[in-house]
Amino acid sequence: MAGLQGTSLPFLYPCLQSTRSTSRKLLQTASAARVSQCHQHTQSVLHGRVLPEPLATSSYLDPPSEDYGRTIFADKCHLTIAAGGGGNGCVSFLREKYIAAGPPNGGDGGSGGSIYIQAVRGETSLHKLARRGTIKAGRGENGSGKSKGGQRGSDILIQVPVGTVVRELSRHDPLVEAEGNRMLEASTSKGAEDPIPDTWKRDKWILYPAATTSEFARSDFPPFPRARKSTLTMAQPQPPISLDLSEPMDRPMLLAAGAMGGLGNPHFVSQSLSRPKVATKGDGGLSIRLELELKLLADVGFVGMPNVGKSTLLRALSKSRARVGNWAFTTLQPNIGTVVLDNNQGRPRLQSYNAMGEPRTHISIADIPGLIPDAHLDRGLGHGFLRHVERAQVLAFVVDLSSEDAAKALRTLWQELREFETTKDMETNLSTAGKIVDWKAFGSSVSSEPAKYGAIATGEEGVIIRSSSAQKLPPLTMAPISTKPWFVVATKADIQGTQDNFARLQAYMHAVAEKTVDHPSGKKTSWKGSLTAVPVSAIRGEGVERIPELIVGLLKNG
Ligand SMILES: Nc1nc2c(ncn2[C@@H]2O[C@H](COP(=O)(O)OP(=O)(O)OP(=O)(O)O)[C@@H](O)[C@H]2O)c(=O)[nH]1
Ligand SMILES: [Mg+2]
């Protein structure tokens, strides 16, 4: 067992932790003793300000490693949406006493259900959609006798967090496919004047069950009706879909309209055919493969090395139950905490307005997994988490006063962000250069080729954008990290001998503000606001009450 000891033990073998309750108790007692011993010291680091009572008990801010709420999180997902297919039309005839051969009375098939999307407040992650993979609306019911139409298929509403970007990867539209085939047939037929043969296609028709094959062989079939589209399709966004749902929507938006139902046999009555024994099948539903990505993660994002106390700080600021542990990479995916800005009776504790001019009732904070040097090269937990950093409006750099030089840690963090931005810009340029766009300067916007899935004609110039499932979309364009407002939270201020480290950090930040040293972001476009460093002891909840105030001041007001 000696070989198993070390900081990775609770991470790798959490079950062994529970059997060690005695040793944990001992540890907790030691931690409490350490905290009380350090209390005097914290007072001096926190500028001798009169501190309020600790915000919470030490067990909440210094919890055992197994006391946490699991958060499932996804900021990106691929989803296939399939609008409902239409129900089939019905072949039926009136049957009544003394009426030997009644007129046709087959009902039409019901149309398929549609798929809608709505950005709502309260949703913070895309994990529920990521799990589903494919979302299908209901199919329309088949028509039935006595001219009864089939019922509509059920609609589906997809609710996504505000700040979701939706992009189309590919689509399969059976109507476009059918139209393409028809055009192909037309172009291959001998002369343009020749009538296009309406060939008998068993897969398109519903046949009267009681009819014999010879009956069909003898009779003439009516021409197959042209493809129909419901008026709902007019409300569909133009392909390829590209939506930026950055505001809450009070009504859902249509993504894919359900297909039309088939026609019942009364539609095919003609002078030559009084009792048609055919009806049509419902259309197939449109299916679209989408990429959903969260553009906004939270108002504030914590940026820090592993084990500096980010999760403890989130616990101290909000009611989050983020996992805390004395080892690196305790947090493996972002935890979102919410700080309520009113007293829960509508009275604001801090007056602030969002970009839409509404009073801000809460701020959200993302505790992002720790960054290590060379994270931009995908080391540690890699790029994924640097991506989260650029999705916060304000950055809070969390540095540990008890370990190395805090100013140096701040510079290292900025360097990672800088490198990440440069690498990303290069990747974006490369992927944009590789994109192929065919265009015709003059003439009609319709391609001479038959329509294919994903071949979309837009605009007067006839630009044809080919989107295929193999194509990788370029990353979302975000505000550069260097232009975001930021501040520093210096944690573990309760530990002995951290005053000097904090004083050095302050001196460095002062020098940056005075421009006597280079800005850590190394960019000319860096944020120009006043730089602040807040010393806190998150484990005691001391000094943290200043942070919401600071964040509210940095967030964009309406
Ligand atoms: N003395 C002291 N210890 C703290 C303070 N804040 C956090 N700690 C301790 O530091 C250790 C790491 O805390 P975490 O909150 O898990 O650190 P983290 O930055 O979230 O770590 P990762 O998730 O691995 O990146 C835990 O043992 C905490 O109890 C503090 O203000 N003072
Ligand atoms: Mg953590």
Image (spheres, rainbow, N blue to C red):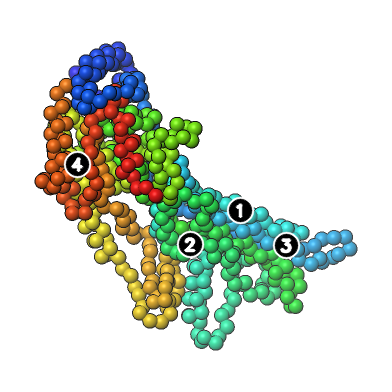
Task: Please report contact status of discs 1 and 4: CB closer than 8 Å, yes or no.
Answer: no
> How busy is the neighbourhood of tag 1: few (under 14 within 10 Å), some, or many (20 plus)?
many
Q: Which residue is mark 2?
A: 237
Q: Nearer the viewer, mark 4 or mark 3?
A: 4
SS at circle 3: loop
Please state the horizontal and vertical placement of residue 230, each as a whole percent of the image: 59, 64
Q: Is residue 554 above or below residue 505?
A: below
Q: Which residue is mark 4?
A: 413
Q: Nearer the viewer, mark 1 or mark 4?
A: 4
Label 1, label 2: how far apart the Cα atoms are: 21 Å
Label 4, label 3: how far apart the Cα atoms are: 71 Å
Task: Choose top left, top right, bottom left or bottom right for residue 412.
Answer: top left
Q: Which mark is residue 153?
A: 1
**Label 2 residue near ligand 2, CB within 8 Å:** no
Q: Residue at x 68, y 62 (%)?
A: 108
- Image quarter hosting the N terminus: top left
Q: Is residue 217 above or below residue 10?
A: below
Label 1, label 3: how far apart the Cα atoms are: 19 Å
Q: Is residue 193 above or below residue 523?
A: below
